[in-house]
Amino acid sequence: MIKSIIGALVGREMDRRDGSGGAKGAAIGWAAGSVLRRMGPLGTALGAAYVGKKMYDRHKGKRRV
């Protein structure tokens, strides 16, 4: 369950990078979720770290403005 959520968050962050929404982010999220599942706990930690860093950077950018 948590890996699915992290996969969806990774897909959303990757999709935000190019600015357009839609199926691309969903596909990346699905692929990331399946890769995370195969990597086990290490994959979950890596995915969570990626999403956490992106959220931290976004928060830090909002504070400067």
Image: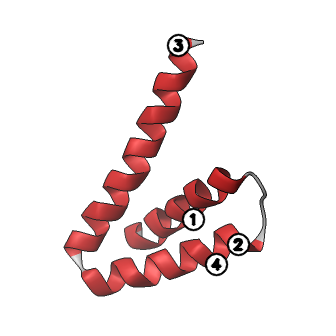
The disc, 2 or 3, on the residue closer to the chain's N-terminal end is 2
Cα gap from disc 2 to disc 3, whole angstroms: 30 Å
The residue drawn where x is 46% and y is 24% is 60
Which marked residue is nearer to the observer: mark 3 or mark 1? 3
The disc, 4 or 3, on the residue closer to the chain's N-terminal end is 4
Which element carries disc 1, helix, strand or loop? helix
Q: How many marks?
A: 4
Which element carries disc 3, helix, strand or loop? helix
What x and y, as percent, mark residue 41? 21, 73
Compared with 60, 14 (above or below) is below
- Residue 18 lies left or right of residue 50; in this view the side is right
Cα gap from disc 2 to disc 4, whole angstroms: 5 Å
The answer to whether mark 4 and mark 3 are in CB contact below 8 A is no
Relative to the observer, which residue lies in front, 56 or 4?
A: 56
Mark 2: which amino acid? Lys
Q: Which residue is mark 4?
A: 27
The answer to whether mark 4 and mark 1 are in CB contact below 8 A is yes
Q: Which residue is mark 3?
A: 64
Compared with 17, 23 (above or below) is below
Which element carries disc 4, helix, strand or loop? helix
What x and y, as percent, mark residue 50? 38, 54
Q: Which residue is mark 2?
A: 24
The answer to whether mark 2 and mark 4 are in CB contact below 8 A is yes
- Residue count near mark 2 (Cα–Cα under 10 Å), binned few <14, some 14–19, many ≥20: some
Q: Which residue is mark 1?
A: 11
Q: Quadrant of the C terminus?
A: top right
Cα gap from disc 4 to disc 3, whole angstroms: 33 Å
Mark 4: which amino acid? Ala
- Residue count near mark 1 (Cα–Cα under 10 Å), binned few <14, some 14–19, many ≥20: many
The disc, 3 or 1, on the residue closer to the chain's N-terminal end is 1
